[in-house]
Every structure is written in C-alpha cells, then in structure tokens.
Amino acid sequence: MKPTDIKNPEYFHKVVDCQYACPAHTPVPEYIRLIAAKKYTEAYMINWESNVFPGILGRTCDRPCEPACRRGRIDEEPVAICRLKRVAADNKDNEVVKKLVHRKPKPNGKKIALIGGGPASLTVARDLAPLGYEIHLYDEWEKGGGMMRTQIPSFRLPESILDEEINYILDMGIHTHFNTFVSSMKEILEKDYDAIFVGTGAPSGRNLNIPGREAADANIHIGIEFLANVAFEHKTKVGNKVIVLGGGNTAMDCCRTSRRLGGKDVKVIVRSPFKDMKASPWEIEDAIHEDIPILNNMPPKEFVVENGKLKGVIFGKVKAEYDENGRRKLIPTGEPDEFIEADDVMIAIGQDNAFPWIERDLGIEFGKWDLPVLEKETFQSTLPKVFFGGDAAFGPENVITAVAHGHQAAISIDKFCKGEDVSERLAPTINLATQKMGIHEWIYDNYISDDDRFKVPHADKKKSLNDRLVEVELGFDEDLGFSEAQRCFNCDVQTVFNTDRCIECDACMDICPTSCITFTSNGEEDDLRTRLLAPANNLSQSLYVSDVLPTTKVMIKDEDVCLHCGLCAERCPTAAWDMQKFLYNVTKAS
Amino acid sequence: MTFVKPTFRHPKQATNKIGFVKSDYEGTISTLCAGCGHDSISASIVQACYDMSIEPHKLAKISGIGCSSKTPTYFLSNSHGFNSVHGRMPSVTTGANMANKDLIYLGVSGDGDTASIGMGQFVHAVRRNLNMVYIVMNNGCYGLTKGQDSATADFGSIGKSKIPTPFQAIDLAALCLELGGTFVARSFSGDKNQLIPLIKAGISHPGFAFIDCISPCVTFNNNTNSTKSYTFVRDHHEATGTLDYIPPEKEISIDYEGITQVKLHDGSMLNLSKLSPNWNPKDRFSTVKRLAEAKENGQILTGLLYIDTESQDLHTINNTVDIPLNQLKEKDLCPGSKTLEKINEGFR
C-alpha cells in the first residue's frame, strides 16, 4: 500500500466517526470535552455555529452520529452524543449566548426570499443575515420553525426551547411574513429578490385510499396535519380508542400525542414486520413504555362505518418473505381478517414533496418524483436565482440534513449575489495541533472510562400522560453529563506517526490495548488486512500506512478500534507517535 | 502519564485452545522507560504463553533485582510470582522447582543480576540442568542506577557516559555452553519472530533453557557506538537460522534440504533452517567455534545456538519420585517406627 496522505483533510476526518457521519459535520468530541470541563457556553457555541439548533437537536436529532460512534464498536453502546448536546444547551449562560449570537451587520443592499420557515430556511437566514442580506421569510403558520414546530410534539420539544433558538435568528433583523401561504412562485419572482430559497419541506402527508375512507373522513386524520393541529391547539381531544397506521417517527408522535389527548386504548398497527419499522429505536421504546401496543404484519383493508360514523378498521394478516436480493414481499397468511374498533384513526405512512405553487413555465425544471432538478453541491435549480434545501431538495430526510443543506445553499446564494461562480467552493478549514504538554502528559484527558451508557431520567409517567406540554425526557444533570462525556474516546485526537523518528522498538505495538498497530512487510491492502496483529475486518475503516522504515517494514495502524488513549505515544521513546488534535470545520458563507 | 491500561481490548480477540484470550496473559502497564527492549521481551513471553495455551496458574515467574527483574509485573498477572533478592533468582527457582516439579519455571534476570552479583547462582543452575527457562534481558548497563557499564558491556563499547568500556565482556551464551548448558540461545528484543519461537522451545525443553536476549536500554545505552543499541544490533546480528516451533499435537512431515528437525521431549518440533555455515546446533564444539568466529568478525550470532536433545533435568538426574515433593504427605514420607527400627537394626 502507498503511505497514507494525512495532509488530505478527509483522512483524519473519517477517523472522527461521529463528525464524519453528521450531515453538518459538527465537531462532536471537541464539544464533549468542553462539557466535561463544564464549559457549557463554549460547547453550545460550537454546536450553534455548526448545527444552528443545539437545544432542539439535543432533544430530537435523528443522531446519525451515534450508530457511527467508535465506542459502539468496542463497548456495548455508543456515547449518548445527542443527550450531551442538550446538556450544553440546558446549562449554558443564556445572557452570554445572547450576546454571542447577536449580529448587527451593515446592509449590503441585497434581498433574499426564503419560502418556508423550517430548519433549512432558518439556517440560510442565520448564515446570510450577518453578511448584510435583507432576508424575507415566508411561512403559512403563525410562528417560525416549520416541521420542528408543527410535527414534533411538545412533550419531546418544549415550545420555549423552540422559540429561544428560532428567535436567535429572527432577532438578526429577519423580515418575517407569517400566516402567509405562498401560492405562486411567479409572484415571488416578480418581487425583485436577488435570490430565492425554497425550504418548504415535504408537506404532503400520504393518504390511504381504501374502502370507507371518504365516509369516515371526520375521524380519519393525516398524521402530520393532526400533529400540526395539536401544536397550534386547533385539536385538543381524540376519542377513547385510537389506531395509528404506520411505523415511522410520525406514527410514534401521533400515538403518544393521542395518549395525551384522551386516548386510553391507543394502538400502532403496521403492515410489515416489527423489525422493519422505520422509527428510531428509542422512539419505539418510549411509545411502548406509554402502554401503546404495536401490532405488526397487518395491512389495513377497510374503514368500517356505521350510521355515518367510524366504527373501526378491518386488517388482513400477512407474513414477510424476502427474495435473494433482500426485497420484501408481504404474503397473506390465509388467517381470517381482523376487525379492530376505533374512534379515531391517524394515517402516518409517509410524506411527499409537493410543489403545486411553483408554476412549471418559470424555468425551474422538475425531474423524478416531481422533485426539482438541482446541482448536488450547490442546491441551485435550473433557474439560477432559485435554490432549494432541506426536504424540499431531495425528499424527506431530517432536521440535521436540512441544516447541512442550508449552510451549503447559503454559500451558493452568497456567491451568486456577488456574481461569483457558485460551483467554486472553499475547502474545509482544518487544524492539527499537538496535545503534548510534558514528557507523557497531554492537554486532553486520555483516561478511558469503563462506564456503560447512562440512561436519561424521565418525568413521572402519570404526570406526563396528563399534559402534553410536560417534557418526558429530563436530560442529564451536570454530574451525569460529566460521566457520559468521559465515555468519549476523543477520536479527534489523532495518532500521528513520523517515520523518520521511529527506531522500530515495537513499544507502541506491545502496549496498544486493542492491538491496532503492527510493524510488518508491506503488501496489498487485502493481504495486509489479514496479516495484522488483529485482523482488520472492518473494511469501512482505513489502514494508516507509514513510509518504509530502515528494516524495510512499514507501520500499519488499523483505525477501526483505536481508543485514542495515547499509550502508543507515551511508550514511544523518540516521539515518532504524537497525539494531535484535528479540528475540521465545514466552510460557511462569509 | 497513564498508570492504568484501559480495560478495552480488540472486540474480536481470538481465544487459544483452552479458551483464554491474549489479554489474560498480560500484566499491568509497564513503568520502564518508553521504548525499553524489556517490554518487547515481556510481550514475547505473553505471546508465547498464549500460543502454547499454558494455564496461567501452571507457571511461576521468578526474578531478582533490576530493570529486567521488574518485568514479571508486566506479564502473566495470573501466574505465580517471586521477586527475590539480587542475583538469587536461580537459587529460589531451584528451591521452588525441587518442591513442585509440576510448574513451568520462567526466570527473568538482567546482565547485572546474572553476570555480576548472581554469577555464582547462575553457573550452578546451568551445571545442574535445572528445568527452567532462564532469560537474561541483556542491555550491557546498569539502567536502574543510571547506566554504568555492566559485565556484559563489550570492550570498547560506548554508552551515554561517552567513555569506552575498558574491560572484556562476559559472553553469557559462551559461558553457558562451557558449563554444559543443554539449550543455549541468543536473541534480540527487536526480533520477535525469532524470540517467540525460542521462548516456546525453551519452555518445551526438559532442562536449563538459556536465552541471552539483547535488549537495548533506550535511556543509557542506545548510542550509535554502543554494541547494544537498536541500530548496532540490527546492523551486526547474524542469525544462525530461522526457527519454527511446532506444537506437539500438530502432525508435520517436512523433509526438504536445509531443514534440521529437532524433536523435543514433549513431542513438539523445531524446524531449523540453517543460515549459518560450519555449524550444527546439536554439536557443542561447532557452536563454540562458530560463536568465536562471529565475535572475531564483530558479528552478533543469534538464534538457537545449541540444543542437547538427550537432556536430562535435575529431577531425572536425582531420580526423584513422580509426585511433586510438596504433595507428599506424612504417610508417604514417614516409614513408621517399625520400619525405622528395622533400618536402625541394619546399622548395629
């Protein structure tokens, strides 16, 4: 293998699994260390710069970082990254943060319209307002936040948190046009904005057209519409018996919300096997904890109506079979259909994009699934001054992805307004700094905690089921937060090898607790992976290969299960190994 | 400075024949200088014992005083240990071995512990062919007292003091051969491929298995002009041959030219491919000659230098009973007054 080029920013970035997996590439270990040091405000600001909504995401993020966390490959469970983010948000100094996020820029004379007030648009606003842009935000609801407000129930995300973080942005002098449903792109284009950003999400909840649908319409609700109506208190009660159709996070939110609006007998019914449910495991767990059974392998067949009122739903019985490509087929088992009583039914079987308000003769092309045709990196549509982001760009994803889109779209809009080439984008900024403090002392705390993942305390179940505004998760307190933070391996503190200094004493190879380091003769990657001290079977993780050493061997380090404990560097007599903190920041609009 | 090794290990650690993982053979974190050759020898011992599926409680590690003699803390934490008086490791091991022949005895010593204060103990353990592995972690200096020349420092070798050694060195391997040692090897801490099979062969050898292991002192004796530095040893060591240890249960039938097969007492095999001319590992004279030649040429001869496949250890020579002496009860040992009277009668 060729020696690893550690100057390539992506090499060490990939080693920081959590940051690499995060769509916004938030420097996770950096803020976790700050939390351990009780520097909550600093930790919050790192998050705010990167993901804009630390308090919101610290409660509701999809957490792509956690399955990626290296600790999960070595210990039983990953670090509770998402919950630690909340610790920073809960304990920060609000006054200081307010001053830090406050921006009062000189106007640059350019006007931008943002359609939709969700996370993508708000991110664009956060990035561009400080640069002097005059920003006009349009949203159909009476407050900003988009799906974060309308689709995430208050027992998961209190309104105060939402208001606080959205106001940080709106207070930058954003011109808000709430309660304004934009029904024509043409009209917006006519109002001489320099650029337009579309962040309207995936606003159309899928319907279920089976017999009885129309007759029972009064008691059948589309999941995301139901949640929005609850959020704005247009709906305050549901019937005793509720069936939620669907197995995603919206279904989980619908059933748990129903429990709080008078639903005593609430069931989730999915048409496929339990294990195929799309909802996050922790959301499913919380729903079950609130006495909500989840019935699987039961596709709905018919809404039963009696005297003009919904009586219940008839379900078929199926089993799943998978062909050799893993494609699933639901086969009827032949068992008799089952009738289940219901006063209300929520349909939460998916969302679609919908752009009925964009006239098709404006030069904005639409492609597959009626999604806009976009440049993948720049989010620019075929009409150069119109940009898309969030769920509106490539279909339903999640908040953190919308934020990542927002940052990139902001760069594009800024470049577009300056008359620059939007496809010419700056590389990320990186910094690699030694952590050496003394002979065997490091600036970072290299102690490896043995603790299991800590559980987040919950509010009293009876109390929270009675009031949809009571937040269920209480979050880690400072002590629990510290203990959980200590579980982080500091994967951003990189093991950097200097071939010229190595005397091949093997000390690093002997000490490494997880047998990551091997000195051996070079070869092809496939062959090398089998020849190491411990076979490197995780192909998604890189091998760090040195230049040729005096004995003709090379140093190979399997990055897979490195604890970043620094023992290789401590046992190295010549400082050929050094622990260096790698900070990777995605370039933002500036 | 880290004083506790993290408890996490590679999640896919393999187990050996008796179900142990390699970390079951580890010790606590080393407090020797970073880069010390001794740590590599400790790691080789861990690897050898893991590979041989030795039950940790069936091994006793015994040492004297010095940097080398601290190392038993850094390997085989689950085995028996005795950190004895300076230079008295061979005597303590003799006592332990006499009392319980069922254990594997692994003695660890240094050049000071063996070639100076413990010389009297060492030579007698060799001539008695005590069943043990005797490893000398040889760095040519007294590292624990800031690097004075030891008795194995080669004439003219220059350590950190910058003063060339004015005296002749004691060659422990040659001495061991002279005293009738039945297993004589020399190795280098920086060459685990050679050291690990040697340790395994030493454990299998019934009798005194001596390994003189050059182990650079990175702090006091790793200068370019020192004959025990990493670079000097790498540039000047000449292996007698490559070594392959084959455990007893493995059926092997290699029969090709250049390979000498040595069958050990416990059924294990050594495959030796000879690199060195004019030398036969089973012929003491050729080894003595070859060692002298290497010294003349400024080379360090490493590998298995000599092996006596007919070796008989101290228990065999003394014809002791099969049951370890420490397990003999009063009724086994005391013949009773009637028999005693009879014996006494015989002397009247």
Image (spheres, rainbow, N blue to C red):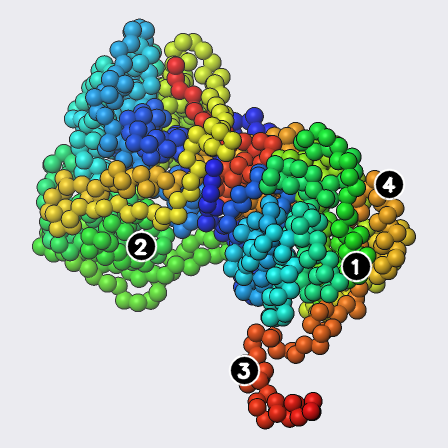
Q: Residues within 10 Å of mark 3 (few under 14, many from 20)?
A: few
Q: Which residue is mark 4?
A: B297
Residue A555, placed above or below residue A337:
above
Q: Residues within 10 Å of mark 2 (few under 14, many from 20)?
A: many
Q: Which residue is mark 3?
A: B330
Is residue B256 rendered to the left or right of residue A518? right
User: How much space separates mark 1 and mark 3, taking CA atoms?
Assistant: 38 Å
Q: Which residue is mark 2?
A: A271
Secondary element under disc 3, as helix, strand or loop, is: helix
User: How much space separates mark 3 and mark 2, taking CA atoms?
Assistant: 79 Å
User: Are circles 2 and 4 on residues that touch, CB within 8 Å?
Assistant: no
**Which corner quadrant of the image does residue A50 belong to?**
top left
What amino acid is found at the position of numbered circle 2 in the picture?
A: Arg
Q: Is residue A49 visible?
A: yes
Q: Residue at x 44, y 37 (%)?
A: A446
| Label 1 or label 3, whichever comes before in sequence order | 1
Q: Which residue is mark 1?
A: B179
- Residue A163 position in % (x across, y down): 19, 27
Q: Are marks 4 and 1 on the same chain?
A: yes
What amino acid is found at the position of numbered circle 1 in the picture?
A: Leu
